[in-house]
Image (cartoon, rainbow, N blue to C red):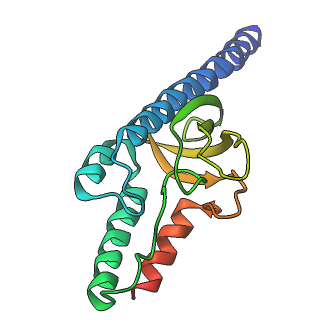
Amino acid sequence: MKQSAFILVLLLAAFPAHAQSADRDAGAAAASFATTTLALPRTGGIPAPAARARLQPLLSARLNALITQAAGAEARFRTANKFAPPLLEGDLFSSLFEGPTSFRPGACTGTAVAQRCRMQFSRPPAANARGPARPAEWGDDLLLVNEAGSWKVDDVDYRGGFAFGNTGLLSQTLAMVIRAAS
């Protein structure tokens, strides 16, 4: 009985360390993703093939498949509608249409298989004829999954609340593009 209780105490004591390790590892993956997206060319919409290749190892199989499907849908739409604007414009990986210029990682919470990591983004003020502009600052959540021992971004929860920015989830936005081009 004493040995069973001792083992239980050891397991319970180890669990927070394991959870903290998962939070830390997911946070590092989230920061790597943010660093990579900031370094990509700012073209807006679905990333070009070269940018998708850079992002591929950082994304879950599910999100990679959705982005590939949305890229195909966008190409079909452009072929059928030569003079229409793209189905998706602006930054794909954050709430703000123009996208961030810097980030600060926040806390990650979750389990050993799924984590939610807050990212604090900012963008300097744009020139504004109506007076001094303030920098844009907001937080979005990266949703990560553990695939075969590596943390991968599986979705973005747009939390910025901008009037002309992304809302909901990245996966929902991509599904809308796929449906619109069908």
**Looking at the picture, how far across and down is residue 20, in whole percent?**
62, 22
Asked whether, in this view, residue 54 is left or right of residue 23, the answer is: left
Residue at figure coordinates x 46%, y 32% from the top left: 29
Of residues 116 and 177, the one drawn nearer to the viewer in this rendering? 177
Q: Quadrant of residue 106?
A: top right
Q: Quadrant of residue 149?
A: top left
Residue at figure coordinates x 46%, y 76% from the top left: 177
Asked whether, in this view, residue 28 is left or right of residue 163, the answer is: left
Of residues 66 and 46, the one drawn nearer to the viewer in this rendering? 46
Picture layout, residue 63 above or below residue 172:
above
**Looking at the picture, how far across and down is residue 71, in whole percent?**
33, 69
Residue at figure coordinates x 54%, y 60% from the top left: 170
Asked whether, in this view, residue 132 is left or right of residue 173, the answer is: right
| Quadrant (top left/top right/bottom left/bottom right) for the C terminus | bottom left
Of residues 158 and 150, the one drawn nearer to the viewer in this rendering? 158
Asked whether, in this view, residue 146 is left or right of residue 121, the answer is: left
Picture layout, residue 45 above or below residue 82:
above
**Looking at the picture, how far across and down is residue 34, in whole percent?**
47, 37
Q: Quadrant of residue 73?
A: bottom left
| Quadrant (top left/top right/bottom left/bottom right) for the N terminus | top right
Residue at figure coordinates x 48%, y 57% from the top left: 92
Total labels: the figure holds 0
**Looking at the picture, how far across and down is residue 111, in whole percent?**
62, 37
